[in-house]
Amino acid sequence: MARRVNSESRPANPARSGPVQSSLATHALAEQNVPRYTSYPTAPHFHRDVGPDTYGAWLAGMPEREPLSLYLHVPFCRDLCLYCGCHTKAIRQQAPLDAYAASLMAEVALVADRVGFRKISHLHWGGGTPSILNGRNLSDIVSCLDAAFDLGSLREHAIELDPRHLDRSLVRVLARLGVNRASLGVQDFSPHVQQAIGRLQPYDDVARAAGMLRDAGIQNLNFDLMYGLPQQTVEDVRRSAAQAVTLSPQRIALFGYAHVPWFKTHQRLIDAAALPGASERLIQAELHAHPLDGFRGDLRVGRQVFEVAAGCDVDQEECQQCDQGHDDERISQSRED
């Protein structure tokens, strides 16, 4: 889904004021909830009345000659990280995954029946952890897509991966299927932060995953980092950003943790008293950007969502966190491929 920004509701851009006013305005906005425009329609617009007829009408109304982008969601993980706001759940058995793969292929056929044999420009697997389906199911789904759509013009085939659950066999399958971009969830390299969020993942695990992907020819790597996490300090943020840069990803996306335990009940296991306040979060976000200045080439930088809504024309990638209207900050820096 594409991002839409409502220009009529944009707040003033603090970056365009003087330094003192800019600082005051930025910190004031940091204390407020703001609209999120990470996808369109946004998640709150989906409700029980949006059924197959409505969805079918949307598909039927798409311009006939326009290439399409496809997003395949796999809502399963081996373990559920405490910070996660995505639509996913932990699963250990293969049978439900096989059943979901079959349902996904049936959905591909239904969509293709509505839109016809169309060119696909971008294909993205998100989750959850899409690779949990296993190589056989991933191959079957791509074969199904290839029969239903024209993948000959595919510019980008991207997948989100958990570095802890990646081996050379799976990487070879991904390369054979034409994956040319992989997004690795890093979050923070500090052991005490990883312990607090229930995701133990040493730097060496990420380096090993990046090396395997590049050895297989998948050169375009994204790293996801987070700030505002429990027990996370400004020094943790600085060090994690610097360590991420040493692995030379093509893109780094920075997400602010959204604490919504009333919506994501597993977040109740996070000690709210260990979370940084809004002003501290802003300092962490700003500090995160400094080690990223070492990227070569064109840097695309989007500040917090309230600044994106305030007139940033940068094309941001989709945010994979839940889109429930709560405040969330994101910085994205990328190097041209």
Image (spheres, rainbow, N blue to C red):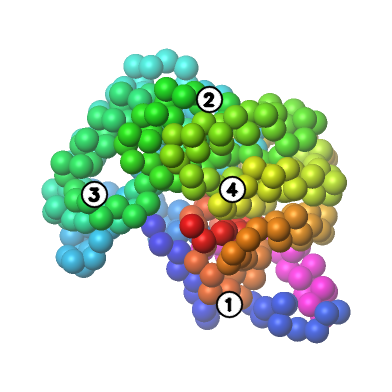
* Side of 288 relative to 325 (left or right): right
Q: Eyeballing the image, is 41 above or below 176?
A: below
| Pointer 3 residue | 151
Which portion, as a residue range, is magenta?
21-37
Q: Amino acid at mark 4?
A: Pro
Amino acid type of the residue that numbered disc 1 sits on in the rendered structure: Gly
Image quarter for residue 208? top right
Tag 3 near tag 2, CB within 8 Å? no
Judge depth for marks 3 and 1 and give the one in front: 3
Could you tell which of marks 3 and 1 lies nearer the N-terminus?
A: 3
Tell me the kind of residue under disc 2.
His
Q: Where does label 4 land, which residue?
A: 249
Disc 2: which residue = 165
- What mark, if any, has residue 311 been given in the picture? 1
Element under disc 1: loop
Instruction: Please state, as top left, top right, bottom left or bottom right, where the N terminus lies in the image.
Output: bottom left
The nearer-to-camera label among 2 and 4 is: 4
- Count of all numbered marks drawn on residues in the image: 4
Q: Give the mark toward the camera: 4 or 1.
A: 4
Q: Residue at x 25, y 61 (%)?
A: 67
Image spot of residue 191 (x, y percent): 77, 30
Which is more N-terminal, label 1 or label 4?
A: 4
Cα–Cα span, label 3 and label 2: 28 Å
Element under disc 2: helix
SS type, badge 3: loop
Task: Report x, y in % for residue 309.
Answer: 58, 71
